[in-house]
Image (tube, rainbow, N blue to C red):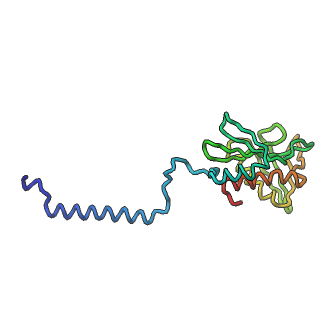
Amino acid sequence: MSKSDSLTPEMIKILKIFGLGSILFVLMLSFFNEKRANNSGKEDSILSITDAERIYFKNVRGLYYDIEGRDDAKMTVYRFGKRLIESESPLINLAILINRVKDEAYIYVEPSWDTNYFKLRITLDDEVNTFDFKSGDKLSHFEFVNRIYPFLRENAYFEVWKDDKWIPILENEKEIDALKTPISDFYRLINNPK
C-alpha cells in the first residue's frame, strides 16, 4: 500500500466534520418538521371513513335507512326510511353512499322532480340567501349540503324555483327532519363535528 492511497489526517478530519455536520443537519430538520408523512398509500380525503365509523353507522344508524346494494359500483346506498316519497310539492331527499373500495362516504342530493339543476331560496330573519345546485361530482353534493345545513337547524323558510315561480319547500318538521337526520348521520360517518 502506497502512502498516496491511505487517508491523511487532514482528510479524516474533513470526513468527520462532514459526517457529524450531516447528522446534526438531519436531526435539526426532523425536530422542526410538523408535517408528517402519509405512508398509508392512500390520499387523505375529507370524505374518508374509518372502520369504527362504518361499523357504527351500519349497525346503529343504518337501522333507520332503506339499504340498496350496488355491487356493480361496489357501493351501498342508504336512504332515510322516514323520508317523504310522494307529495304534491317538490321534495329534496338525500342518499348516503358508502364506497367499500375507497373507504369513503358520499352524500347525494335527490330532488323529487327530474332535474340536474335547481335554485333554492332560503329566508332567515329577513335575510335572503339563494343557492344554486348543479348535480356533479361528490364534492358538489357535499358543498350544497354544507351550505344548507345551518339553515335547517334554524327556523328558515325554503323555496325552490320550479315552473318559473318560487314554490315553498320543507314546510313541515317531517320534511326538515328527513334532511337533517341523514346530514347529521353523514357528518358523524366522516367524523366532521358540525
What's the residue at 27%, 61% (across, down)? 19
- Judging depth in this view, the residue of 16 and 184 nearest the camera is 184
- Judging depth in this view, the residue of 129 and 65 nearest the camera is 65
Is 87 left, or right, of 26 in this rendering?
Answer: right
The residue positioned farthest toward the front in the image shown: 59
Residue 101, relative to residue 143: is it above or below?
A: above
Residue 108 at x, y percent in the picture: 74, 44
* Count of numbered circles on the image: 0
Residue 131 at x, y percent in the picture: 78, 50
Is 25 left, or right, of 162 in this rendering?
Answer: left
The residue positioned farthest toward the left in the image shown: 2
Residue 7 at x, y percent in the picture: 14, 58
Is 86 left, or right, of 40 in this rendering?
Answer: right
The residue positioned farthest toward the top in the image shown: 72
- Judging depth in this view, the residue of 23 and 169 nearest the camera is 23
What's the residue at 64%, 54% (across, down)? 52
- Judging depth in this view, the residue of 151 and 82 nearest the camera is 82
The C terminus lies in quadrant? bottom right
Is 130 left, or right, of 30 in this rendering?
Answer: right
Q: Quadrant of residue 95?
A: top right
Residue 36 at x, y percent in the picture: 49, 58
What's the residue at 80%, 58% (across, down)? 151
